[in-house]
Amino acid sequence: MFQIDCPFCGPRWQVEFVCGGEAHIERPINPDMLSDDEWADYVFMRTNSKGMHYERWCHIHGCRQWFNAARDTVSDKIHATYRMGEKPPELSS
Amino acid sequence: MPNKSVGESKKQGALDHCEHTGRPAYIEVGVTLTQMRPTGLVNVRVRPDNLAVESIRNKLGCDLPTVPGTVESSSDCHILWIGPTEWLVTMSSCEGSVASEVLSAALAEFHAAVNDVSDSLHIIRVSGEDARLVLEKGCSLDLHQREFRPGRCARSVIAKATVLLHQTDDAPSFELYVDRSYAEYLWRWLEDAASTLVGVKRQE
Ligand SMILES: [Zn+2]
C-alpha cells in the first residue's frame, strides 16, 4: 500500500489524494510584457525530470488541503511533503 | 387514504427502505447498523484565530477543535475537524436552518462561510465489538484503540465512498457521515462486510 504523508493528517493511503502537477510555477508578474514564447513556456512547458520532482498534491478525500511533495520519478519514493508557501527542501535523488 | 398525506412534509431518509432488511448476520457478528437522524448539520469555514474560536464558544458552548482529527463536544453539539479551516457542526437540538443562523450570527464579524448541509449527508452508526473488523474490510485508517479513540474523527475513504468517520464511544461505535447519494451503497456494503464475517468467526 502506497502512503503519502499529508502535512496536516499524517500518513494516509494514496487513493485519498490527487496529483496537481509540477509545483513552484509562478504566474508572471508582468503578463503584458511577455512574448508568445514566454507565455507558452509558462502555460505548457514542464520539467519532466528523471529523479527528484517537486509537485502539488491535494488531500481531496481527507482534509481537502493542497500541499507540495518531492517525489523521485524513478523509484516513486516521496522524500518530503511540505505546506504551500514553504520553501522546497534541498534533496538529491 | 391518499388525502391524508397531502400537506404532510415528513422527510424520508435515503435508507428508510433498507432498515427492514436486517439479516441475523450482524447480530451474530456483534455489529449493529443504525440510520441516525440528526437535526442540524452545518459546514463552517473560517480561519481559527482566537476571536473566532471565542465567538463560537460563546454561542454554542463548544470549542472549535484545532488539533487535526479531533472532535469537541457539548451536551447538544459536536464539532468535527475536517481541515485546518473547515469543520462540521452537528446540533441535536435544532434544525439545520436554525443551526446555520446561530453560526452565521457567531461569525458575522469574520471572513467565514456557513452552509446548512443537513439534507446532503446521511449518518450510519456502526456499533459493537466487531465494528472495527467490519470497517477494516474497506478502510485503510488505523482504527486500533492505541491510535483511534472516542473523540477522534477522520475524513477518509471506505469501500470507495468518501466518509467522515467519528468514534463516539468505546463499544466501539463509529458514526459515518456520507453523501446522501452514497448512503444506500455504503449501507449495503456494510451489511455484506458484516455477513462475510460470520464465516470467518465460525471457522475459528
Ligand atoms: Zn490531510
Image (tube, coloured by chain):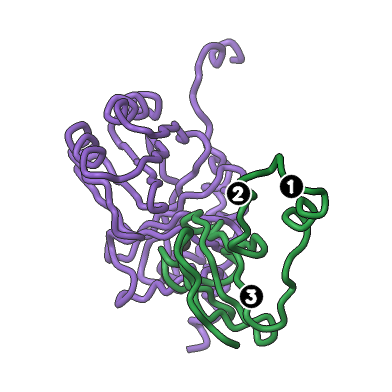
Chain colours: A green, B purple
Marks 2 and 1, how far apart at CA? 48 Å
Q: Secondary structure at mark 1?
A: loop
Marks 2 and 3, how far apart at CA? 36 Å
Q: Which residue is mark 1?
A: A34
Q: Chain of mark 2?
A: B
Question: Picture coordinates of residue B141 (x, y %)?
Answer: 46, 70
Question: Picture coordinates of residue B137 (x, y %)?
Answer: 54, 72
Which callout, 1 or 3, points at the residue further toward the start of the chain? 1
Quadrant where the N terminus of chain A is found in the figure = bottom right
Q: Chain of mark 1?
A: A
**Nearest to the observer: residue B202 or residue A53:** A53
Q: Which residue is mark 3?
A: A53
Measuring 50% from the left and 63% from the top, which residue is drawn there? B24
The lab-note entry on whether marks 1 and 3 share a chain reads yes
Question: Picture coordinates of residue B187 (x, y %)?
Answer: 55, 54
Question: Picture coordinates of residue A26 (x, y %)?
Answer: 61, 55
**Residue type of the residue flagged with mark 2:** Tyr
Measuring 33% from the left and 69% from the top, which residue is drawn there? B148
Position of A46 with respect to B200 (left or right) is: right
